[in-house]
Amino acid sequence: MYSQSSSLTVRDMTKMALCVAFCCVTAYISFPLPFTPGMVTALTLALGVTAFVLPPKQTLIALLIYTFLGVIGLPVFVGGTAGLGKLFGPTGGYIFAWIVVYPIISALKGSCPSFKRYALVDIVIGIPVTYIGGLISMMLVMDISLEAALVMAVLPYIPGDVIKCLMAAFLGVKVNEAVEKRG
């Protein structure tokens, strides 16, 4: 039997569904780089916002739902792609990393909305863990060196990812403040 505090409310499920939808939509806001299978995407902005507006367990559930939707064939992955093969392709490591890192970011965000804390946690933890996932998958799937993987999976993305972390922190604070006002 579940206690009232451990069950999800309609409000919780609605917030999770909105976050999943936000992830699905922003995955389409992507463009390729000619020298890498990875794409620049607004999805990482949505993942940050998800971590900032949901508690860790709900963040994990939302990301698992998002991933499940892509795996079963709905075109919700970056660039409108889908399928199980995406998880085990050159960029699949990013997806696995997101499932791990964004619940951690949610757990470390603190109890009060704070732009500085949100941005710091996303930049210091989110970016490196995500890049580690991307590095591993590109090195394994493409059989390339660490140096080549750094050029393809990390270096071109750093400036944009820092900007997206700052934007996610800003939006996360604004959404949380609005939710608190509405009670």
Image (tube, rainbow, N blue to C red):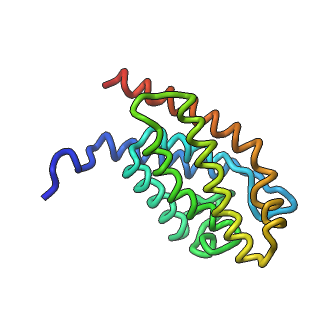
Q: How many marks?
A: 0
* Residue at (68% x, 70% y) in the render: 137
Quadrant of the frame with the N terminus: bottom left
In this rendering, would 74 be left or right of 153? left
In this rendering, would 76 be left or right of 91? left
Task: Choose between 28 and 108: the one closer to the eye.
Answer: 108
Query: Residue at the top extreme?
Result: 181
Task: Choose between 79 and 6: the one closer to the eye.
Answer: 6
Quadrant of the frame with the C terminus: top left
In this rendering, would 6 be left or right of 70? left
* Residue at (58% x, 42% y) in the render: 122
In this rendering, would 114 be left or right of 140? left
Residue 76, position in %: x, y? 58, 58
Residue 125, position in %: x, y? 58, 48
Residue 96, position in %: x, y? 56, 64
Task: Choose between 51 and 131: the one closer to the eye.
Answer: 131
* Residue at (64% x, 49% y) in the render: 127
Query: Residue at the left extreme?
Result: 1
Residue 95, position in %: x, y? 59, 62
* Residue at (49% x, 44% y) in the render: 50
Above or below, comparing residue 41 to residue 121 in the picture: below
